[in-house]
């Protein structure tokens, strides 16, 4: 038996999961705060922390019930250490430390981005290395190469807005609500990609991203039409914006694949739920004759099952973090943190 109970509180979802051997989902509880933050048009950090505090203990109880386990069935406690909102992270970290201490079980600190990548390990398929992973979420856009388990090299990342952040800001100006990605994705299917928005590729050969020019161009387009009293075709704006984001993500990923020559390609993070991006990555993998791994939709956005999956290789290596573990809001994927 090797059941890891994992806690995720880095942003606006309180999540608890219990996963056996890093693969088999025994419980996956997610309490979303989206409704609470929606009226502010984005996440309010102080409110997020308070909501995590209210939601976490009942959610842990629910997870144990769902897995039909009592505390004796838990072998380790994993938690997201960062990156994320510091107050939100601290609720999870403090709870995990208390649990690990009370149970006398190992405490395992997990990087949230590693979690997104390891959501792919929850599928039945075996993962082969080297691989290239495109991680696209509300806070991050990164191209990562992995030569083996838990070995990450960042090939490129955004220099300004994350892809998901651009989706959310464009959705906000189109009055589509928060979070914008899923609604914009649906609306784009009814529109035409006919508006010429910038597809910033940066310097020749760069695997970094920049989405702020695209975001500003879309916002200016909408504001100009409104100032002139003209109608905004929201579906066309959505389709043209999404096509520009997906085109840049696909071309950069293609460059990374040609550089690393991986045996597989992975997609991860909240924006991996995007239908057009999934199709583009499928086309790319097929064209290069490599396999593609994409988590199921519900494991793309924040959850704790992915944190348990990323904690598994740490557990197997007998890693055990200390009880003075602290949240690190700016934790990088390639940071080596000695908390053991
Ligand atoms: O990974 P995630 O749940 O949270 C972070 O770690 O940031 O990602 C949330 C982001 C939001 O920006 C949301 O708008 C975006 O993922 N998202 C999508 C879709 N579903 C969620 N973006 C585009 N298309 C979607 N279908
Ligand atoms: Zn996330």
Image (cartoon, grey):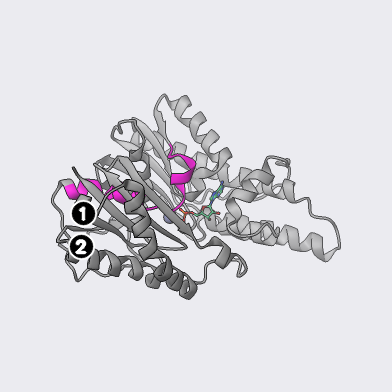
Crowd band around label 2 with a 10 angstrom C-alpha radius: few (<14), some (14–19), many (20+):
many
* 223 or 96, nearer to the observer: 96
Residue 300 tag number: none
Indicate yes or no whether the magenta region holds residue 33.
no
Q: Secondary structure at mark 2?
A: helix
**76 on left or right of 131:** left
- Count of numbered marks: 2
Q: CA distance from mark 2 to mark 1?
A: 7 Å
Res. 210 visible in picture = no
Residue at 26% of width from left, 56% of height from top? 78
Q: Residue at x 39, y 42 (%)?
A: 133
Q: Give the quadrant of the C terminus.
A: bottom left
CB of mark 2 near ligand 2 (< 8 Å): no
Q: Which residues are magenta?
A: 294-315
Instruction: Decide whether the magenta segment is chiefly helix, strand or loop.
Output: helix
Q: Residue at x 85, y 58 (%)?
A: 230
Q: Is residue 286 visible?
A: yes
Where residue 293 appears, x then y in whole percent?
Answer: 40, 35
Q: Which residue is mark 2?
A: 100
Residue 76 disc label: 1
- Quarter of the rendering containing residue 338: bottom left
Crowding at mark 1 (Cα within 10 Å: few <14, some 14-19, many 20+): many
Q: Is residue 279 above or below residue 43?
A: above
Q: Is residue 314 magenta?
A: yes
Give the left or right position of residue 232, taking residue 36 as reference.
right
């Amino acid at each position: 038996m090797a059941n890891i109970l994992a806690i995720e509180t880095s942003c606006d979802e309180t999540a608890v999961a219990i996963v056996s051997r890093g693969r088999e989902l025994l419980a996956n509880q997610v309490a979303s705060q989206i409704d609470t933050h929606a009226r502010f048009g984005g996440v309010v950090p102080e409110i997020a922390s308070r909501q995590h505090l209210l939601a976490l203990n009942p959610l842990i109880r629910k997870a144990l019930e769902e897995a039909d386990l009592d505390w004796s069935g838990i072998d380790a406690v994993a938690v997201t250490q960062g990156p994320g909102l510091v107050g939100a992270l601290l609720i999870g970290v403090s709870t995990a430390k208390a649990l690990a201490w009370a149970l006398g079980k190992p405490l395992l600190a997990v990087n949230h981005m590693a979690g997104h990548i390891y959501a792919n390990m929850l599928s039945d398929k075996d993962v082969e290395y080297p691989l290239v992973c495109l991680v696209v979420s509300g806070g991050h856009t990164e191209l990562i190469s992995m030569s083996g388990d838990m070995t990450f090299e960042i090939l490129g990342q955004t220099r300004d807005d994350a892809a998901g952040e651009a989706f959310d800001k464009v959705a906000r100006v189109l009055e589509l609500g928060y979070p914008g990605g899923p609604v914009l994705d649906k609306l784009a299917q009814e529109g035409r990609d006919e508006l010429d928005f910038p597809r910033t590729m940066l310097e020749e050969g760069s695997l970094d991203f920049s989405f702020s020019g695209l975001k500003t161009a879309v916002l200016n387009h909408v504001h100009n039409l409104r100032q002139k009293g003209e109608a905004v075709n929201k579906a066309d704006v959505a389709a043209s914006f999404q096509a520009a984001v997906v085109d840049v993500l696909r071309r950069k990923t293609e460059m990374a694949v040609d550089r690393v020559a991986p045996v597989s390609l992975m997609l991860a993070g909240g924006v991996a739920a995007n239908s057009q991006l999934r199709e583009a990555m499928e086309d790319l993998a097929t064209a290069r004759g490599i396999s593609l791994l994409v988590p199921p939709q519900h494991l793309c956005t924040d959850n704790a099952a992915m944190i348990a999956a990323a904690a598994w290789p740490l557990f197997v290596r007998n890693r055990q973090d200390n009880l003075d573990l602290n949240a690190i809001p700016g934790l990088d994927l390639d940071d080596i943190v000695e908390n053991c």
